[in-house]
Image (tube, rainbow, N blue to C red):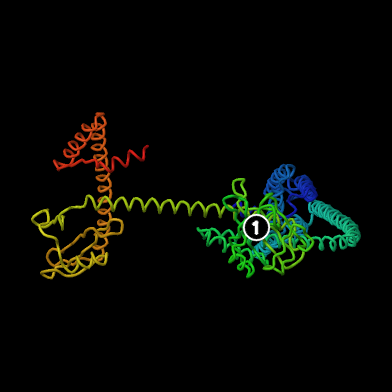
Amino acid sequence: MFDRLKKFLAGEFDRDPSFIRLARNILIVVMIATLAILPLFAGITGEEGSRNLRAFYTLAVSLLLELISLAFILRGEILPTKVIVPAGLIMVVLIISLETNGLRNTSMLAMPAILIISAILLGRRSLTVALPLMLAATIYIALKDLQTGNVPAPIGVDSAISAVILILATAGITQLLIARLNESAERARQSEQAQRLENAELLALRASLEERVSSRTAELEAANRVNEKRARQFSAVAQVMSAASSAQYLDELLPLVTRVISEQFNVYHAGIFLLNEQRDVAVLRAANSEGGQRMLARRHSLPVGQTGIVGFVAATGKPRIALDVGADSVYFDNPDLPDTRSEIALPLRYAGQIIGALDVQSVEPNAFGSDDADVLSTLADQVAVAINNARVIEEAQKTLAEAQSAVGRIAQEAWQILRPQKLGYGFSLTDAGIQPLQIPIENDQVRESVSMARSARGVGPGNRSRIAVPVRLRGQVIGVIQLSARRQNLLTEDDTEIAEAVAERLSLAIETATLLEATQHRADLERVTTDIAGKVNSSTRFEIIMQTAARELSAALGGSDVIVQIEPAALELSIKENL
């Protein structure tokens, strides 16, 4: 509540030193007037009825409050003065008038002065604060006069003295107000003079500013054109790289880059050259123009360091601009691109090594500057990174495909060796428990699942729902999982997905087990072969070697009959060849 009242009474000049000084002077005048009137109500004049203790005490309290306000105002706090002075003075006039003569009392002469003080201290808020209080006090005094019907007391010396004091106080306050107005007028005059001086200076500056503005405007327009061009170029770089990031293979990356460069930079021709493995020839790998397509069709290439701007850039690793291709001795005249008037070539460099060149051509002379070279160099670096990434991806995918092919081939070979010899090998789980299959399962769902390599759903004996899910090994169906619902339950699509997931895990487990058994099988073969070779090599006699080989081979093969024969003709032929 107090904060809201404080905010309501606060004025824009409360921190103004001159306004604080004015309020202090008004307060001093009011205090002097109060001190002057105070003895009159103590009966100092000696007149009959001049002694009025209630009025005396009211003036004393008012004086005390004014002293408190003075203490605050000396500290720069003006709010107590704005509240206490008008309210205290209205209260003093009200009590004195009620005590003697009512509206005819000389204290009513203070009302205009109180209104002036309120207007100075409160500004326009005095109309909503002080004026209603003054009207209410005046009306109340008038009502009391009408009710009591008191006969007015004769005017005495104290009344005359009070009237003189009030008139002097009003004159002093008016003089303070006039001084304030004069001070404000002087400030306004000084401000007007300062404003005139500033206007003169502004008028003087205006002419020079107009000239500078016109020249700066021309400079800014030129700079804006350059900045707009750079912004479009960098936006084009971002779009080129965004398009390049969506391609993973060189065959789709390079044409995409040349097409987007041509569209975003509005050039006649864009081409990408890559060095061969010997790094002595730059081979055109992508181009957007019709002439570039013809060059691609005949596998266009340029010797590094010998022909054209591209060959120069591929050899030196430095960007090269031909502003007028007809006058540039390095330019290589190309009949497939007859409209070229300016050309820029930039090296494609990755990890410090040149891998190719970016060639951009325009139908306009002097189409490329140093700024274009900077932007396109940034683009060329990003294109080189994208090319290297595509190469790495292609190499990784090639290696992965070879590894997967090798693993698949090994798994297939292992499966052919280690697959169950009995047809229909498997197990069945029923209410009676899990048991080996006695005969292979055969029905419409199994046949469809094996032949089509997909899950098959149907109905079996007793109208029971049935699902057959193939088991694959490296793309080849090697088995089947059959689910039959118990009682009248219906197997749903979710059941099929669960069975397919289990079949996939089963195929992985079978593949792992097959590879492990194949590895162990090869290890056993190597061990047997090593043992036989060790025993055969332990003898130096020809007959013993042959006998040992036949005996050990028969033992390793489970007692098979073994014949070891050296044909005389073959032996003789071997001897002749050695000689």
Residue 4 percent across, percent down from the top left = 61, 54
10 Å crowding of disc 1: few (<14), some (14-19), many (20+): many
Q: Which residue is mark 1?
A: 302
Name the amino acid, label 1. Answer: Leu
The answer to whether residue 109 of the structure is visible from this angle is: no
388 versus 71 height, above or below = below
Q: Of all residues shown, which one is farthest toward the left? A: 432
Residue 135 percent across, percent down from the top left = 69, 63
For the point 26% across and 46% down, which residue is it?
518
Secondary structure type for disc 1: strand
Image quadrant occupied by the C terminus: top left
Q: Residue 535 versus residue 223: which sits nearer the camera?
A: 535
Q: Residue 90 versus residue 515: which sits nearer the camera?
A: 515
Q: Write down the quadrant of residue 223 in the picture.
A: bottom right
For the point 26% across and 29% down, which residue is it?
540
Q: Residue 192 versus residue 363: which sits nearer the camera?
A: 363
On screen, residue 573 versus residue 235, left or right, reads left
The answer to whether residue 300 of the structure is visible from this angle is: yes
Q: Write down the quadrant of residue 265 in the picture.
A: bottom right
Q: Residue 237 versus residue 211: which sits nearer the camera?
A: 237
Residue 145 percent across, percent down from the top left = 68, 63
For the point 16% across and 63% down, which residue is it?
484
